Image (spheres, coloured by chain):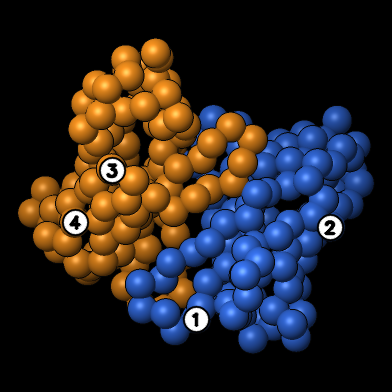
């Protein structure tokens, strides 16, 4: 049973560029959440997708956008990159109606903005 | 809003020592509570969870009890090993489907032989 996978593993971009990160959820899961983890900090919620729509959003600017595909995989897009966007981006998947709301995390994508 | 406060690290212990990492939370209602572990260079792994008051979550020798009266969920282990060295995150999720998870800032544990 494949767990949550993310690509790429590492990415280096320059300020002002745009980036797309990808996530495939654990088999059987229909909900994907994205988190940003700055160095030495806990993950911060960016947004959550299910049924191909953004359902919840954290305190992140509109430069951060996403998409969910019919196969439940998801993308995170960040436009006009800033140095402060350098972080580990984590994807987590879950099953929408699972009552204990257990999330499974991928290994993350390390984004460095120079 | 919801928040999680956990003790600052790093925590350095000798092998076989007793571990406690404190965690308190602020939330309305009855959230689910979690401990996640992050090994160097890796993503987060769920260590244990508790979904209602007085529940005890346990896994790999780690335990935590959901204390509603003190809004706490302290992580304990009776005898740590070098392989337990990692960053530990306390987290909560409000009741109801697909609520976002709020994490603490993490506590780094280093176990020395």
Can the viewer see residue B53?
yes
Query: Which dot marks residue B56?
Result: 4
Image point 44% across, 53% down: which residue? B46
- Choose mark 1 or mark 2, whichever is in front: 1
- State the orange chain: B
- Among numbered discs 1 and 2, the one appearing first in the sequence: 2
Q: What residue did someone put label 3 on?
A: B62
Does the residue at mark 3 contact the one at mark 1 (Cβ under 8 Å)?
A: no
Query: Which dot marks residue A96?
Result: 1
Mark 3 Cα shell of 10 Å, populated few (<14), some (14-19), many (≥20): some
The correct choice, above or below, for A100 with respect to A21 in the image is below
Gap in angstroms between the C-alphas marked 3 and 1:
28 Å
Residue A52 placement: quadrant: bottom right
The correct choice, above or below, for A28 with respect to B72 in the image is below
The percent position of residue B28, horizontal first and vertical second, equals: 24, 64
The percent position of residue B67, horizontal first and vertical second, equals: 13, 53
Query: Which dot marks residue B72?
Result: none
The correct choice, above or below, for B110 with respect to A77 in the image is above
- Among numbered discs 3 and 4, the one appearing first in the sequence: 4
Does the residue at mark 2 contact the one at mark 3 (Cβ under 8 Å)?
A: no
Camera-side residue: B2 or B35?
B35
Q: What residue did someone put label 2 on?
A: A20
Gap in angstroms between the C-alphas marked 2 and 3:
37 Å
Callout 4 and callout 2 share a chain: no
Does the residue at mark 4 contact the one at mark 2 (Cβ under 8 Å)?
A: no
Q: Chain of mark 1?
A: A
Can the viewer see residue B2?
no
Image point 59% across, 80% down: which residue? A28
- State the blue chain: A
Q: Quadrant of the N terminus of chain A?
A: bottom right
């Amino acid at each position: 049973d494949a767990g949550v996978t993310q690509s790429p593993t590492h990415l280096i971009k320059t300020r002002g560029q745009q980036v797309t990160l990808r996530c495939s959820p654990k088999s059987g899961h229909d909900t994907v959440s994205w988190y940003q983890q700055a160095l030495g900090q806990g993950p911060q919620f960016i947004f959550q997708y299910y049924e191909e729509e953004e359902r919840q959003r954290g305190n992140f600017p509109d430069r951060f956008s996403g998409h969910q595909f019919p196969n439940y995989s998801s993308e995170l897009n960040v436009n006009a990159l800033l140095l402060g966007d350098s972080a580990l981006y984590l994807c987590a998947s879950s099953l929408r109606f699972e009552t204990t709301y257990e999330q499974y995390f991928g290994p993350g994508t390390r984004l460095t903005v120079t | 809003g919801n928040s999680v406060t956990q003790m600052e690290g790093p925590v350095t212990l000798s092998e076989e020592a007793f571990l406690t990492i404190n965690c308190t939370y602020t939330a309305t209602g009855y959230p689910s509570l979690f401990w996640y572990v992050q090994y160097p260079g890796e993503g987060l792994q769920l260590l244990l969870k508790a979904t209602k008051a007085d529940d005890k979550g346990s896994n790999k020798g780690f335990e935590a009890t959901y204390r509603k009266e003190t809004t706490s969920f302290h992580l304990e282990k009776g005898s740590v090993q070098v392989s337990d060295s990692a960053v530990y995150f306390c987290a909560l999720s409000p009741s109801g489907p697909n609520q976002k998870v709020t994490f603490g800032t993490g506590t780094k544990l280093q176990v020395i032989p």
